[in-house]
């Protein structure tokens, strides 16, 4: 008897398998679409002068302050938002969208709009997302470029003498390096015919020239926070919320995912494929090797390719450079391709670079841009401005009676034998050369002169404290300028000069050179001393420096410190350095602390600030006193007198034969 037949079963249900494959394909398509369009849906970055930025130059604090004191502000992301009849606050940063600003000006011809101009140059602070480090004012040309798109005006030249501003009855301290425009009828005045807030004659457009009245850094001051509310209340047409613009910072694009179903994708693909590829393209950048701080220079981009092609190019650069009229444009046709001439301005000292070059061109149908990114390596040494240093050096040389760079010879001074002369009454007997006197039959005295060929080491600290600005310029830049001034004097005087830069570790070390012809080399190596956010390691730096010195030297250290605790390791190292070498510390007076300590108190907070500032100044003097006890010389000078004070002490050392 046979067993009953068993029906074979499939391991997977066909319907389940079908829907599983369909769901996988649908998920893959959705992932592709979201990956493609995700960058467009992101909010403007949390950094810079945007309403969402929490950095010092941002305005997230003002948004929150308005929310806490009234209705929550709105955010304008589209053209429909911009058309609403409420006060719109437009915050401008150097990298804002120029086309977006043009749309705002067209859409809000009859509606109240406040434009806030940019002021500061910033760099991202490493290790702190959304934080920025301020290192100086924007060039006037950059601010005027944005101001010129709104009104026929320019930022005023020169410093305003106004110490306080009247903002709707609130007297607030004027911001640092106040930014203003000329206006006979200002809404907020900064002196005679100087406006911080002005209104256009033919449109309800208001321009706030100095953002330090309403940005995050300003709102830490309660008086400025109250004044910011008063300023906005005056410009509001009615009670209600205000609106901040985001379109200037990347928002506002229209998104329609359905367009992927109707656009002729195949036609676009053909147009993209028909364009010539990277293999037929070769491009280069021609730029000068060095330029002075604040100077403008030209850059030529040359592209070589086969066949007719209308191309555009854009060059990538670091924060030390700023484009005068844009960083790209259309290439002008040449016999073998195209070329583009651009102008840049050097903003700050260091080794600037152009790191990449974008070149793009349209396909035959003009529907698709073909783009390539070409790596380039073009470095420019942005040198400190030494024109003023040379002038001061010549003046100091004349005052010190130096001729052609050689120290004036003074009888009886120095150790180096110069000549014999007749003995005169009043000369010391130790100066008489008895052997030669016997030979010539009359008394002859030896005349000496100040020694040359001394070794001078300029050690510059570029750590975190030295990168803080003093009167708008980082301390390290002022130290470099003073070092170059003294280097010029020393080289003219026949001494040997070397440069040493350090922060957490040694960064720059030049060999000792002699003669004025080598000043250019010292100047170029000084450009390599970069800004740093790291704490200074004095032990490693000074120990390394001492190991490299094989003869007695004058070691000039440009640095800064806050209290005895942070300077303790420095003091231990200095004690070993002074055993063999002559050490001179160059310090800049902390004018901010001195101002707080001497400010007449008007409130309890002023008293507290004055007490803390006075304590910090006393601790600073404790460190200076300990340095002097260790045998080091210390000069604490005003930042404008740092270079001349150093040269005067150097010449004094030579006269006293301490080198």
Image: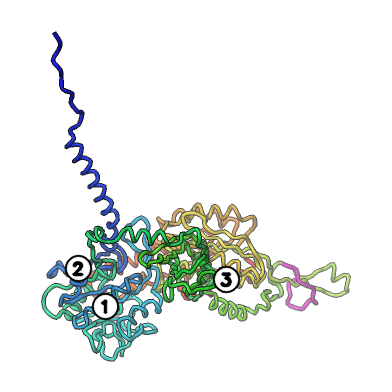
**Is 615 located above or below residue 213 in the figure?**
above
Residue 234 against residue 446 in the figure, above or below = below
* Mark 2 secondary-structure assignment: strand
**Of residues 625 and 202, the one drawn nearer to the viewer in this rendering:** 202
Disc 3: which residue = 486
Mark positioned earlier in the residue sequence (1 or 2) = 2
Q: Is residue 624 visible?
A: no
- Closer to the eye: label 1 or 2: 2
Along the line of sight, the residue nearer the viewer: 535 or 63? 63
Residue 311, x across and y down, in percent: 44, 69
User: Mark 3 or mark 1, which is nearer the start of the sequence?
Assistant: 1
The residue stretch that appears in magenta: 416-429
**Residue 136 location, x and y as percent?**
40, 71
Tell me, yes or no, whether the highlighted magenta stretch contains residue 418: yes
**Picture residue at 48% right of the left edge, 61% below the top:** 461
Which circle's residue, 2 or 3, is located before the other in the chain? Answer: 2
Q: Which mark is residue 75?
A: 2
Image check: 348 left or right of 53?
right
The residue singled out by tag 1 in the image is 115
On the rendered image, what quadrant is the N terminus found in? Answer: top left
Q: Secondary structure at mark 3?
A: helix
Callout 2 touching callout 3 (CB < 8 Å): no
| Local crowd size for mark 2, using a 10 Å CA cut-off: few (<14), some (14–19), many (≥20) | some
In space, the residues marked 2 and 3 are separated at their CA atoms by 55 Å
Compare residues 396 and 575 and report the one nearer the observer.
396
Q: Nearer the viewer, mark 2 or mark 3?
A: 2
């Amino acid at each position: 008897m046979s067993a009953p037949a068993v029906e074979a079963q499939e391991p997977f249900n066909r319907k389940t398998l079908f829907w599983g494959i369909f769901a996988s394909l649908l998920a893959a398509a959705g992932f592709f679409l979201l990956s493609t369009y995700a960058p467009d849906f992101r909010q403007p970055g949390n950094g810079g002068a945007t309403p969402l930025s929490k950095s010092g130059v941002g305005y997230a604090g003002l948004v929150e302050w308005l929310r806490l004191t009234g209705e929550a502000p709105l955010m304008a992301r589209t053209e429909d938002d911009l058309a609403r009849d409420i006060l719109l606050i437009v915050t401008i940063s150097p990298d804002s969208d120029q086309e977006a600003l043009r749309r705002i000006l067209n859409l809000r011809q009859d509606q109240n709009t406040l434009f806030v101009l940019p002021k500061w140059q910033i760099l991202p602070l490493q290790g702190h997302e959304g934080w920025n480090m301020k290192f100086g004012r924007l060039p006037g040309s950059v601010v005027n470029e944005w101001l010129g798109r709104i009104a026929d005006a320019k930022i005023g030249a020169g410093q305003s003498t106004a110490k306080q501003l009247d903002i709707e009855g609130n007297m607030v301290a004027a911001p640092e390096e106040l930014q203003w425009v000329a206006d006979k009828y200002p809404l907020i005045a900064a002196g005679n015919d100087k406006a911080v807030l002005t209104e256009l004659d033919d449109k309800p457009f208001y321009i706030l020239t100095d953002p330090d009245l309403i940005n995050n850094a300003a709102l830490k001051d309660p008086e400025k926070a109250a004044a910011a509310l008063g300023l906005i209340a005056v410009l509001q047409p009615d009670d209600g919320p205000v609106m901040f613009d985001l379109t200037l910072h990347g928002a506002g694009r229209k998104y329609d995912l359905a367009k992927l179903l109707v656009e002729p994708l195949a036609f676009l693909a053909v147009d993209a494929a028909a364009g010539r590829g990277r293999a037929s393209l070769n491009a280069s950048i021609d730029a000068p090797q060095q330029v002075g701080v604040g100077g403008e220079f030209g850059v030529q981009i040359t592209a070589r390719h086969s066949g007719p092609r209308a191309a555009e190019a854009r060059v990538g650069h670091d924060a030390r450079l700023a484009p005068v009229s844009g960083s790209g444009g259309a290439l002008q046709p040449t016999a073998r391709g195209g070329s583009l001439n651009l102008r840049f301005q050097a903003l700050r000292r260091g080794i600037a670079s152009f790191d990449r070059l974008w070149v793009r061109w349209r396909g035959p149908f003009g529907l698709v841009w073909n783009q390539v990114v070409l790596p380039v390596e073009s470095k420019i040494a942005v040198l400190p401005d030494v024109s003023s240093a040379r002038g001061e050096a010549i003046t100091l040389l004349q005052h010190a009676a130096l001729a052609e760079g050689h120290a004036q010879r003074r009888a009886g001074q120095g150790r180096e034998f110069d000549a014999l002369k007749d003995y005169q009454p009043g000369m010391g007997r130790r100066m008489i050369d008895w052997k030669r006197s016997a030979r010539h039959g009359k008394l002859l005295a030896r005349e000496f002169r100040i020694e040359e060929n001394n070794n001078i080491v300029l050690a510059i600290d570029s750590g975190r404290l030295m990168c803080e600005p003093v009167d708008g310029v980082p301390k390290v830049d002022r130290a470099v300028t003073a070092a170059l001034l003294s280097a010029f004097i020393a080289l003219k005087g026949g001494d040997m000069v070397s440069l040493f830069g350090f922060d957490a570790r040694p960064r720059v070390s030049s060999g000792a050179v002699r003669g004025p012809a080598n000043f250019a080399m010292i100047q170029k190596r000084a450009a390599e001393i970069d800004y740093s956010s790291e704490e200074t390691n004095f032990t490693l730096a000074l120990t390394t420096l001492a190991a490299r010195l094989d003869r007695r030297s004058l070691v000039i250290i440009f640095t800064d410190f806050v209290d005895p605790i942070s300077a303790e390791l420095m003091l231990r190292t200095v004690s070993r350095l002074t055993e063999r070498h002559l050490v001179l510390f160059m310090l800049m007076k902390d004018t901010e602390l001195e101002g707080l300590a001497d400010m007449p108190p008007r409130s309890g907070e002023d008293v507290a600030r004055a007490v803390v500032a006075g304590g910090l100044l006393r601790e600073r003097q404790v460190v200076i006193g300990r340095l002097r006890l260790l045998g080091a010389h210390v000069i604490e000078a005003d930042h404008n007198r740092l270079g001349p004070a150093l040269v005067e002490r150097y010449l004094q050392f030579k006269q006293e034969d301490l080198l």
